[in-house]
Image (spheres, rainbow, N blue to C red):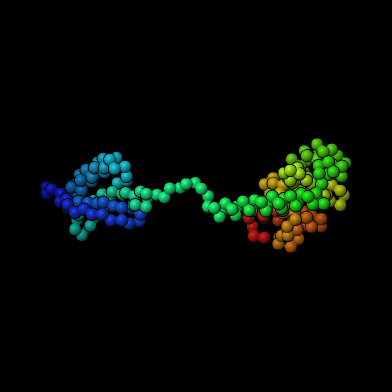
């Protein structure tokens, strides 16, 4: 049996972010191919452990020449991977300034909302309902009434959440559940206009008795539907 022909050609190339070093072994017979493939496999294991990088094979079969070619490929990171730019962990100055400005504007807007004349303290809201502050806070926690957190001012309760009979809208628990049990999300939904409600706010639709339409609009908002 003729000995396998092993070329001495070697070279380097860089493609797809990988630097390669390879050599080629051409084998005229299938039996030679199996033997040398096993040898190259064992060499690849030893090589990969030594250099700490991946080593793979590319095998080409030429049916016309009845020959096979084995090309081990040593994969190494290119320079950009070997010398990454240090991440200092410091945020971009302009981005941090923009975020800080947005937080300041947000806190200012919250303060303006909770200071509105339509916002009642827990005590005032309890008196309006003819109940106690403890009961009001319990209903807030269960989503039966809408109470938004004003930080320093504490919770405030919109007086407009009461229907014509002076009771909190019956849809409030479902709205809280649908909108992630977020009081501010419920508040925004009720004061915003929605295409699904023909341009009405959620509050206007509730005041007009369109409870089903309001809940459907809230569900669509929760799904991320375009309004």
How many numbered discs, if any?
0
* Residue at far top of view: 134
Residue 200 vs residue 49: left or right? right
User: In which quadrant of the rendered view does residue 205 lie?
Assistant: bottom right
For image coordinates 35% across by 48% down, the residue present is 82
Nearest the eye: 93 or 126? 93
User: Can residue 212 be seen in this snapshot?
Assistant: no
Residue 187 vs residue 226: left or right? right
For image coordinates 83% across by 44% down, the residue present is 125
Nearest the eye: 103 or 13? 103
Q: Quadrant of the C terminus?
A: bottom right
Please provide percent x and percent y for residue 48: 29, 42
* Residue at far left of view: 1
Please provide percent x and percent y for residue 126: 84, 41
Residue 187 vs residue 164: left or right? left
Nearest the eye: 222 or 161? 161
User: Can residue 123 be seen in this snapshot?
Assistant: yes
Please provide percent x and percent y for residue 90: 51, 48
For image coordinates 71% across by 51% down, the residue present is 108
Please provide percent x and percent y for residue 223: 64, 53
For image coordinates 72% across by 47% down, the residue present is 183
């Amino acid at each position: 049996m003729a000995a396998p022909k092993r070329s001495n050609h070697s070279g380097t190339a860089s493609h797809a972010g990988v630097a390669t070093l390879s050599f080629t072994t051409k084998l005229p017979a299938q039996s030679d191919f199996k033997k040398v493939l096993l040898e190259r496999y064992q060499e690849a294991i030893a090589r990969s452990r030594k250099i700490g990088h991946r080593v793979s094979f590319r095998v080409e079969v030429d049916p016309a020449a009845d020959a096979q070619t084995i090309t081990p490929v040593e994969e190494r990171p290119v320079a950009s991977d070997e010398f990454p730019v240090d991440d200092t962990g410091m945020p971009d100055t302009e981005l941090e300034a923009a975020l800080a400005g947005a937080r300041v504007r947000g806190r200012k807007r919250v303060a303006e909302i909770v200071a509105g004349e339509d916002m009642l303290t827990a005590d005032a809201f309890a008196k309006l309902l003819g109940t106690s502050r403890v009961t009001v806070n319990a209903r807030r926690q269960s989503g039966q009434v809408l109470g938004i957190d004003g930080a320093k001012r504490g919770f405030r309760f919109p007086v407009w959440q009461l229907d014509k009979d002076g009771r909190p809208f019956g849809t409030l628990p479902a709205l809280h559940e649908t909108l992630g049990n977020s009081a501010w999300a419920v508040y925004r939904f009720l004061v915003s206009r929605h295409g699904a409600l023909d341009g009405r706010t959620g509050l206007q639709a509730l005041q007009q008795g369109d409870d089903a339409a309001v809940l459907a609009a809230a569900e669509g908002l929760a799904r991320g539907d375009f309004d």
